[in-house]
Amino acid sequence: MKSLFVLAVCVLAVQALTEEQKEKLQKHRGECLAESKADEQLVTKLKTGDFKTENEPLKKYALCMLIKSELMTKDGKFKKDVALAKVPNAADKPAVEKLIDTCLANKGNTPQQTAWNYAKCYHEKDAKHSIFQ
């Protein structure tokens, strides 16, 4: 079940999300909205790549989504091995790893900032598999 969400986040394969994956994302979205107290309209804008508003609740939302997907720890450490283990096609792993490394290069001074920077970068590079679907 958890691997389905991870696939939505980090796989570069050209495939649409399954209904089950969409439901999981929606569940995480609701939980993270409640936990972070982020403005729902601003969260919705993230889907289209609108990262103009950068505030603490949105950063907390990004961290929450990455934690729930098991891709990041509460202290902002990305679990690259977990992400790569979920890539179904071994041929895609080098490209996924390169994208992850690129997006982790801009670490923040807090776990929330690191999550925000990573999520923003990943969305810019591969919006189809972003956590903000």
Image (cartoon, grey):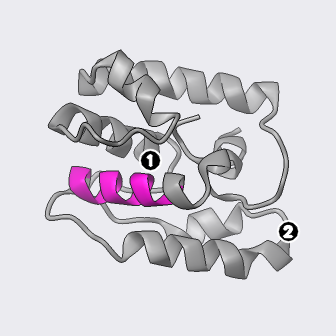
The amino acid on which the numbered mark 1 sits, given as a three-letter code, is: Leu
Q: Residues within 10 Å of mark 2 (few under 14, many from 20)?
A: few
Q: Nearer the viewer, residue 70 or 92?
A: 92
Left/right of residue 63 with respect to residue 79 in the rendered view: left
Report x, y in % for residue 83: 60, 63
Judge from the rendering whether residue 125 lies leftward or rightward of residue 36; answer left or right.
right
Judging depth in this view, the residue of 98 and 81 nearest the camera is 98
Q: Is residue 19 toward the left or the right of residue 113 in the image?
A: right
* Residue shown at 57% from the left, 47% from the top: 130
* Residue 110: quadrant of the picture: bottom left
How many residues crowd mark 1 within 10 Å: few (<14), some (14–19), many (20+)?
many
Q: How many marks?
A: 2
State the SS at label 2.
loop
- Disc number placed over residue 89 in the picture, else none: 2
Identity of the residue drawn at 71% across and 38% down: 1
Residue type of the residue flagged with mark 2? Asn
Query: Is residue 15 depicted above or below 13 in this figure?
Result: above
Q: Specify whether residue 119 is painted magenta.
A: yes
Residue 115: which numbered mark, if any?
Answer: none
Q: Quadrant of residue 45 in the image?
A: top left
Secondary-structure class at tag 1: helix
Q: Is residue 76 magenta?
A: no
Q: Residue at x 27, y 69 (%)?
A: 107
Majority secondary structure of the magenta segment?
helix
The residue at the point 36 percent across, 17 percent down is: 40
Residue 35 in the image, given as x and y percentages of width and height: 29, 24
Residue under numbered circle 1 = 66
Q: Which quadrant, please, contains the C terminus?
A: top right
Q: State which region is magenta.
A: 112-122
Q: CA separation, marks 2 and 1?
A: 22 Å
Residue 96 in picture, x, y percent from top left: 65, 71
